Image (cartoon, grey):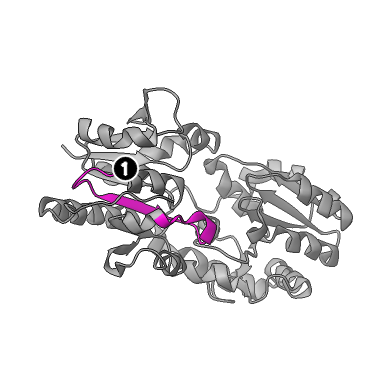
Amino acid sequence: MKRFAVIPSDPLEEYEKKGTGHLQEEYFNPNNFFDEVYILSPLEHRECEMFGMKVIPTKDRQLKKRLKELSIDIVRAYDGHKACDMACGFKQNNVPVVVSVHDIRPENLYKSIKYADIVFSVSAEVTQLVSNYFINSERIWYLPNRINFNTMQPISNSSYSDLSKAYPFKFIVLQIGRKSPEKNIESIIRALSILGEDYCLISIGSGDAEPYRNFAAENKVNNRCFFIDSIKNTELPKYYSFASCLCNPSISEAMSVALIEALACRCIVVTSEIAAKSVNINNLQNGFTIKDPRNIQKLSDIIKSACTDQNAIETIRNNSRKSVECFEKTLIDNLEVDYYKNILDKKQKGDFKKPFLKFWR
């Protein structure tokens, strides 16, 4: 019996709200590698079974006891901050702790990461950040984000006729990502004032939209800006297929799932060179990239090209889906399972039996 403990970054109900709840079992347990998966989290409020996993509300100081009682083989913390603190601060002897880091913001990486046994990093930029605290570079393993190609694929015009009625504009600029400063949504809003009445923005992502609505009003484009908190994951291909382009001009980015999804759906992508690095986007080959995403004139020019330059659009669409095949779910699932096999082999050899000094953050 192989038993796995997960400390997620969000309560499971948040995944349900996003429409991805049914995907969590295969996400946390790729290829059903583990016989039993336990969600041990202070964010949960009741003991139950969800999505094929056993949920046990667990406070940080209860973790060590739980790991022993449940005979857990591996612990996985799904962020570099609070979940990392819990997993690394209350370790059980010879129960390896794996920490996933998906964020490039330094404030979201706690120093407790230095006590992890293995770190899964989504990109070279994240690896560089992690290396500031986690000195064993041989145990920082690359595990990028993944997408399901069966779900993320282009769909026919008739499937998004409802969107055409809801947003009757010639060109649709789509932005997907949380509403936060590093996503640089303000620059898209300012670009709309240059692009003109044919262009609208649909911005999808969690966070407070009110400041962006106010900013759109200040720039006299509020009638062409639409802010949506979230949509179901299964609805995303409809938006990617409907949009003239996806514009994610982030000023910092660990690894954007939205960019991979858009490329798989053959949506034309506009993004910053920073965000393009980790997802294999090359300018005018499988997308449009911009060096300075805060240059509003340049950004508006590139958005216009992404919407109207038919030669570039044809080339990019021909290349886009193939360019992200390396992130296809089956490949990444297999890679993750290989990592777990390696960890269990090290565990059997006693590689994780070592003194642990309690940290204080």
The count of marks equals 1
Toward the viewer: 39 or 94? 94
* Residue 89 showing in the rendered view: yes
5 displayed left or right of 158: left
Which residue corresponds to the image point at 43% horizontal and 33% vertical from the top-left?
Answer: 42
Position of the N terminus, as image quadrant, is top left
Which of the 4 image quarters holds residue 304? bottom right
Image location (x, y in percent) of residue 340: 23, 52
Which residue corresponds to the image point at 62% horizontal and 53% vertical from the top-left?
Answer: 176
Which of the 4 image quarters holds residue 343? bottom left
Please tell me how crowded label 1 is: few (under 14), some (14-19), or many (20+) other residues with Cα within 10 Å: some
Question: Does the stretch in magenta take in 353?
Answer: no
Which residue corresponds to the image point at 77% horizontal and 49% vertical from the top-left?
Answer: 211
Toward the viewer: 45 or 92? 92
Question: Does the stretch in magenta take in 102?
Answer: yes
Residue matched to label 1 = 90
Image location (x, y in percent) of residue 360: 40, 50
* Residue 168 showing in the rendered view: no
Q: Secondary structure at mark 1?
A: loop
78 displayed left or right of 351: right
Image location (x, y in percent) of residue 306: 68, 68
Toward the viewer: 178 or 170? 178
Which of the 4 image quarters holds residue 268? bottom right
Relative to 256, residue 228 above or below: above
347 displayed left or right of 256: left
Q: Which stretch appears magenta?
A: 90-111
Image location (x, y in percent) of residue 353: 16, 52
Name the amino acid type tagged 1: Phe
Which residue corresponds to the image point at 58% horizontal and 70% vertical from the top-left?
Answer: 287
